[in-house]
Amino acid sequence: MWLRSRLFADSGLLRRRSAALLFAIIVELLLILLLLFFVPPLPGRKQSGRTTVFGIEASKGEDSPDKKTSQKKVQKRASAQKQQAQAQTQPKPPVPSPVETPVPVGPPTFLKLSRNDYQQGDISKAPTHPSTSDGDSAETADAGGGGGKSDTPAVGKGRHGETLYAAEWVREPRNAELQPYINENRARYPGYGLVACRTAPRNRVEDCYELGETVGTGFAGSVRQAAFQFLVRAPRVDNKLMVGAWVSIRIDYSQTRRAP
């Protein structure tokens, strides 16, 4: 009786262990199948099933554009590196050093002049009086003289007692030279402006000041402002031009109406 019960217990335990072992085997087989399904096929081995792949395949015997572009870039880079290496290996031509020109050392040179050259270069025989633009010799205002028939007539005394001579025009001023200096707000026609000016070389005048005008017209100021354009000969005394002497200059203004 005891033996029979022991046999029944052993057989139940064996059945439970057999079921557990079978379950473990089934699980392992499933794992192996899953691994085989997800593992990619080895190269060179034919696949039993059909696999559909979507994509674009390049034609046989031709490279893709990206591959060609990369090859060209590699070739250009290699050629540039080669040229740079050749340029570095080539020796540079030597830079010529500047050659200094020797300065001749010797006694100073002298100009050889004849006796005639020395006589012509004597400055003590040069004329001391300046000449005007007309070619006549000129004296200064302090040279004195007077009383000759060809002398310029004196017309009065200036502000500081200087003698005033009548002005002799080389060229009378043009209307375009006088018009810009007329004050149209004060001008009344006819009228005049009178100034005194010191004569200067090249028939010019300077240091002008006003002497008189038609009352309230401002014409004296107009003449004074325009005087830098005047061309007046210096007074003549004893047949000599007195550059620096004073002259009296009068300009008469009149208004001409244009015909309609």
Image: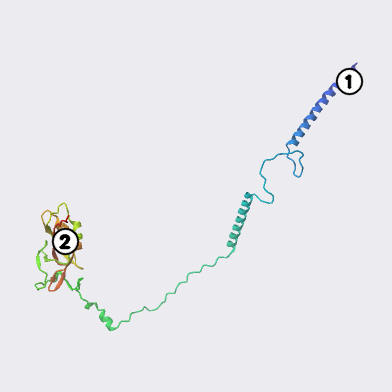
Q: Dot 2 corresponds to which residue? A: 208
Q: Along the line of sight, which residue is nearer the eye, 161 or 240?
A: 240
For label 1, the crowd category at 10 Å Cα-Cα, with few meaning under 14, some 14 to 19 and many 20 or more, is few
Q: Residue at point 77% right, 31% down?
A: 30
Q: Nearer the viewer, residue 92 or 166?
A: 166
| Percent x, y of residue 45 | 77, 43
Helix, strand, or loop for circle 1? helix
Q: Earlier in the sequence, mark 2 or mark 1?
A: 1
Vertical position of residue 241 compared to residue 84: above or below: below
Residue that extends furthest to the front in the rendered view of this protein: 260
* Nearer-the-camera pick, 95 or 63: 63
Mark 2 or mark 1, whichever is nearer to me: 2
At label 2, counting other C-alpha atoms closer than 10 Å, the crowd grade (few under 14, some 14-19, many 20 or more) is many
Quarter assignment of residue 34: top right
Residue at the farthest top position:
1
Image quarter (top left, top right, bottom left or bottom right) of the N terminus:
top right
Residue 108 lies in quadrant: bottom left
Identify the mark at residue 221; answer none if there is no mark: none
Relative to 46, residue 105 above or below:
below
Identified by mark 2, the residue type is Cys
The percent position of residue 192, horizontal first and vertical second, equals: 12, 58
Q: Amino acid at mark 1?
A: Leu
Distance from label 2 to label 1 (Cα)?
Answer: 161 Å
Residue 133 percent location from the top left of the image: 21, 71
Mark linked to residue 7? 1
Residue 33 x %, y %? 76, 34
Residue 37 in the image: above or below residue 176: above
Residue drawn where x is 22% and y is 78% of the image: 125
User: Is residue 23 positioned above or below 176 on the image?
Assistant: above
